[in-house]
């Protein structure tokens, strides 16, 4: 038998009405929880999608530099012209460079640098001196923009922008103490290096590269030949 109670307005209401109200509140609570869960999962999906895009972009940037590296790492090597400018410097330094893997020889009107992959010889024409050293990463980079082609593989986050006629790869050091903290690399559509902007100690250096040609270079040209400068003073800084 169903029981009723009489309200003040004369209408009869069932005693189980509060239970219905309680069920409604529970239902609303469930709906609120469900909406929160939906928003949470939507947020997660957006974050995962963003991470996926970043990972894909990083992979594309690495692939771009891999292809640029393959050109320099070819059996014979390459030759090119370069121009280097630094903030506060008067004019810019220009010259030629020959590269084969990690080895290079760069020549400007003021000096010539040889690097055989381990040791560097720097000949200063004005003083007729040859300094022998084991260069740091930044020192090698300042005369050989192709040094970046061994740097990017570890210790840097990578991202890439398609500029239409070229790709620009942004390298940012994961460790702020690294000598070269940030680099922008411009690579042509056929993956030849066109230019580099390097940040070191808060200052930017810009290097442009033109006239790249494949060559069959001998390993001997990357080591200083004493016979070519017999009167030069040798200063060993190692």
Image (spheres, grey):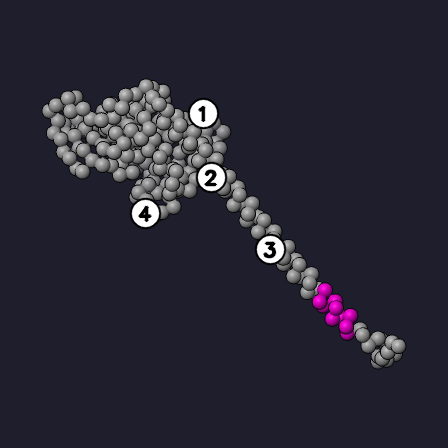
Q: Position of residue 30 (x, y in %)?
A: 69, 63
Report the Cα–Cα distance between label 1 and label 2: 19 Å
Helix, strand or loop for disc 1: loop
Please tell me which of labels 3 and 4 falls first in the chain: 3
**Image disc number at residue 131:** none
Report the Cα–Cα distance between label 2 and label 4: 22 Å
Q: Position of residue 223 (x, y in %)?
A: 22, 26
Q: Which residue is mark 3?
A: 40
* Mark 3 closeness class: few <14, some 14–19, many ≥20 residues within 10 Å: few
Q: Main secondary structure of the magenta part?
A: helix
Report the Cα–Cα distance between label 2 and label 3: 27 Å
* Cβ atoms under marks 1 and 2 closer than 8 Å: no
Please tell me which of labels 2 and 4 falls first in the chain: 2
**Image disc number at residue 177:** 4
In the displayed structure image, the side of residue 139 where residue 40 appears, left or right: right
Please tell me which of labels 1 and 2 falls first in the chain: 2
Q: Quadrant of residue 195?
A: top left
Residue 211 visible somewhere in the drawing: no
Q: Which residue is mark 2?
A: 58
Helix, strand or loop for disc 4: loop
In the displayed structure image, the side of residue 6 where residue 56 appears, left or right: left
Residue drawn at x 30%, y 21% is 217
* Cβ atoms under marks 2 and 3 closer than 8 Å: no
Helix, strand or loop for disc 2: helix
The residues colored magenta run 18-27
């Amino acid at each position: 038998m169903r029981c009723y109670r009489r309200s003040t307005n004369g209408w009869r209401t069932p005693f189980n009405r509060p239970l219905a109200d309680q069920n409604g509140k529970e239902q609303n609570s469930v709906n609120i929880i469900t909406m929160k869960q939906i928003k949470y999962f939507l947020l997660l999906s957006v974050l995962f999608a963003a991470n996926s895009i970043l990972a894909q972009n990083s992979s594309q940037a690495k692939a771009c530099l891999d292809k640029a590296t393959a050109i320099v790492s070819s059996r014979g090597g390459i030759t090119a012209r370069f121009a280097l400018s630094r903030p506060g410097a008067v004019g810019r330094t220009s010259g030629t460079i020959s590269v084969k893997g990690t080895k290079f020889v760069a020549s400007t009107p003021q000096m010539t640098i040889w690097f055989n992959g381990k040791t560097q010889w720097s000949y200063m024409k004005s003083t007729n001196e040859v300094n022998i050293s084991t260069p740091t990463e930044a020192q090698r980079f300042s005369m050989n923009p192709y040094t970046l082609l061994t740097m990017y593989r570890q210790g840097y986050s990578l991202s890439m922008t398609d500029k239409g006629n070229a790709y620009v790869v942004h390298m940012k050091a994961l460790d702020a103490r690294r000598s070269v903290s940030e680099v922008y690399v411009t690579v042509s559509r056929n993956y030849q290096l066109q230019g580099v902007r390097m940040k070191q100690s808060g200052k930017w250096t810009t290097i442009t590269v033109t006239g790249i040609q494949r060559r069959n270079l001998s390993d001997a040209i990357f080591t200083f030949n004493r016979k070519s400068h017999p009167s030069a003073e040798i200063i060993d800084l190692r």
